[in-house]
Image (cartoon, rainbow, N blue to C red):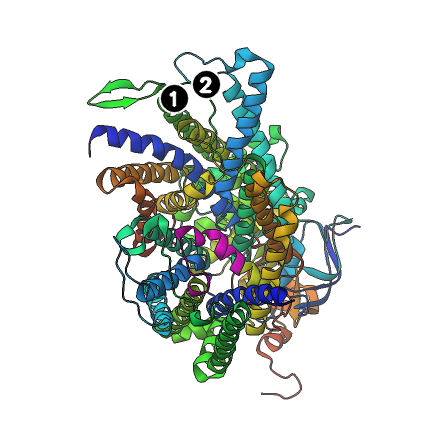
Amino acid sequence: MNPQTLLEGLIAGSMIGLGAIGVTLTYSILRFANFAHGDFLAWGAYLALAISGTLGSLAGGLAAPIGPFSFGWSLPIAAVLAAALTAGLALLVDALLFGPLRRRRSAVIILVMASFGAALTLRSLLELVFTSKPFYYTQELQIAMKLGSGMRATPDQLLCLGVAAVLVVLVHLLLTRSAIGREMRAVSENPALAGVVGVDVRRVVRTVWALGAALACMAGVIAGLLVQIRPQMGLDLLLPLFAASILGGIGSVPGAMLAGLIVGVAEAATVALVGAEWRAACAFVILVAILLLRPQGLFGRPD
Amino acid sequence: MTPVLATEALVAGYEPDLAIVRGVDLAVRSGELLLLLGPNGAGKSTLVKAIAGLVPVHEGTVRLAGVEITAAPAHEKVRHGLAFVPQTENVFATLSIEDNLRLAAQVLAKPRRAGRIAALYAMFPDLAARPASRAGALSGGQRQMLAVARALVVEPSVLILDEPSVGLAPKIVGEVFERLRAINRAGVTTVLVEQNVRAALAIADRAAILVEGRIAHLGPAATLAGDPIVAELYLGARRATAQ
Amino acid sequence: MLDLFGYGAFFLTMALTYAIICLGLNVQWGHTGLFNVGVAGFVAVGAYASALLTTPDAPGRLGGFGLPIAVGWLGAALAAGLATFLVGALTVRLRADYLAIATFGVAVMVQLCVLNLEGLTGGPFGIGFIPRPFAATASDPTLFASLNLALLVAVVALLYLALERLLRSPWGRVLRAIREDEAAARALGKNADRFRLQAFAIGGAIMGLAGAAQAHFIGFIAPENYQPMLTFQVWAMLIAGGAGNNRGAILGAIVVWALWAFSAPAIAALFPPDQQARAAALRIVLIGLGLCAILLLRPRGILAEERTISRHLPPAELKTEKPSHET
């Protein structure tokens, strides 16, 4: 594999990893596979699009590209606001759908089924409002910079790589050093004991939803910036997201990012060797291999 | 004198149509060590879990220092001063000793936290030795100590333990009971569920015997120690027919 | 009047093909507790198998066998059954949500293969000229529609009877025991997995048959017919009708298909002609909300089965108490 393929794989992988962190957190603490996570990602991208566009039209200066990047200040500001809104969306879906099902002691599969329903609803709402026409944050074209060893990357791509790295570190620190992170780890291990120790489990659940959705939003903005924004973008990423979070070990934040990078690089290699139309097969093969060989993933606890 | 912990006509069980605790009136006096005994299936564990908020209460009330906490979620009961040590999985194995304690201290006001944790390290020097090690790596006895230490962080009005001696080597059991006695003598009201009758009676003030979800006997621990009623209720020997 | 009949027959025939899929899913989910989120993939396998066996020659694509329709349908069931068996051999032991993800992935893979292996499947162009049953009567629309409807009714009826028989047989009783009592399942050990695998494969074969029926009824298939949307519709049908219950599967299919079909013109009317993609999206939003509503309000469906699926499936709620083994 040549260095350029590797670099492209890492860039795509950082995006998958960021989304996978959200999946792994909600999976380990809420204990079900949320099929709607991809659509939180898509909603995040679209919300950022709407806000960024509005900001840009209100104050033209905000749309002017910053430095070597293709976007203006409107995008980062929009991304932060969109993250808050996506968190709100996740909390709403939990309040209306998952929460009541959980309190009724529904089986895990019912929750998964409901998440499937929520996924389709959210996706189609996007299609209803925006149609399936692809959108972009900016019309600016970017020239790839030479990085040596035959590698090239645009400033946008390098920035996204950096943002993903920073976010992973921040989330890891949050989880390991902060009080709420401790509570999250406790609830992930044993929710009953957590309650007995004084942890407000419901509050932790809400925090996890918000954090997971905010991360999904960031991943969505990155995906929208580097590729494009379409209603199907979440669905397309769902299998890689699941594969990465299971490969990394459910509950492990560094594992999710590492696994995301692995999936990204593997996909890039697949595209280079077999053809772009088979990219999606890569995540599936990884998923099946992991489930059969080592279901707890790289850093997970054996069940 | 308001009892530290009181239940009135408590009915509880996992399933709504199956009551395991079938009407228990209990009043725990301040500073005492109350022992809950009973054969398997009697409902001792279910009773304390119901008090702690882990098992649904069907009827009746639970009061802590007169305040009703029957339906409060588990974490709120902690804020009221109730500390519960479950029988199994009573520490967070994936968290460090330090994190286990800090987690418990979260309930307290910020200025108090560091002081309480330091006090517990002083009380349990074994834990202070390697605070960063994962709780899962501790031995059975050390884990039990951590569980108790964790419960004491909040300076509870009542400490409830569910069979702390289970799975421990006999020598360790002795140490655990000594600890519990010392903690109780230092002023912590304690409710202890135990199967290890003899050793537990030695440190208890009063003992209650639960049979089929109700209290069949309640009295001073000392008089119970030699009482054949204990054997009868445990082994089901009939009093009328001499064996 | 005859036109209405023709439309009604067409509608009911389509609904019945969905009923077949539902019956297959019911074997997997309702009777065995296996959560298959890749239904569309297995339907596609059946549809393409039958199409390949029965269509005339086409340039650049494998085919030209021109076999009779019955052979096509049989081949579809076998192919789908085999594919499901292979998938099941790998995945039936996984826990419920991993099985869901894995089967979801299978459907994505099937779609990918069908889209890319042009030499085999005609790629994005699909396969056309699939022979219709009773094609000789096509000049008389009413007769044609009635015969097709009669065929589907017969197939569904036979399938229903066969499944009811199967489920009351010793094999079926073991299956029920496995589903209801996890301890019994564990005692059976590997054998429990064997039963689950058989049920999984049977369900898959039935789905393949449905795929073939749909393919031959419409005459044309393409990769975009087998998206997650199809899986979702079938699940909505089964949940609405009452999972675990063969009558419920059939009823659910007809009711949900009716809602789906009859809502189309109503919703399409809300949008100008050039925005029909939006109308389609709105329909999906409504069915999505509908499924969520059913799960919240009446998860047992219309014809609720008395028995619960299994009280031993772990509840999703964060467990705040443990089942007591001691006092």
* Magenta-span inclusion, residue A23: no
Q: As rendered, which of B114 and C148 lies closer to the eye? A: C148
Identified at 70% across, 66% down, the residue is B218
Would residue A139 appear left or right of C48 to someone viewing this image?
A: right
Where residue A39 appears, as percent x and y from the top left, is 51, 41
**What span is in magenta?**
C216-234
> Disc 1 designates what residue?
A156
Where residue B58 appears, as percent x and y from the top left, is 72, 62
**Residue B89 shows in the view:** no
> Disc 2 designates what residue?
A71
Where residue A97 appears, as percent x and y from the top left, is 62, 49
Mark 1 near mark 2, Cβ–Cβ under 8 Å? Answer: yes
Q: Chain of mark 1?
A: A
Check the image and report above or below for B157 versus B15: above
Amino acid carrying mark 2 in the image: Phe
* Magenta-span inclusion, residue C225: yes
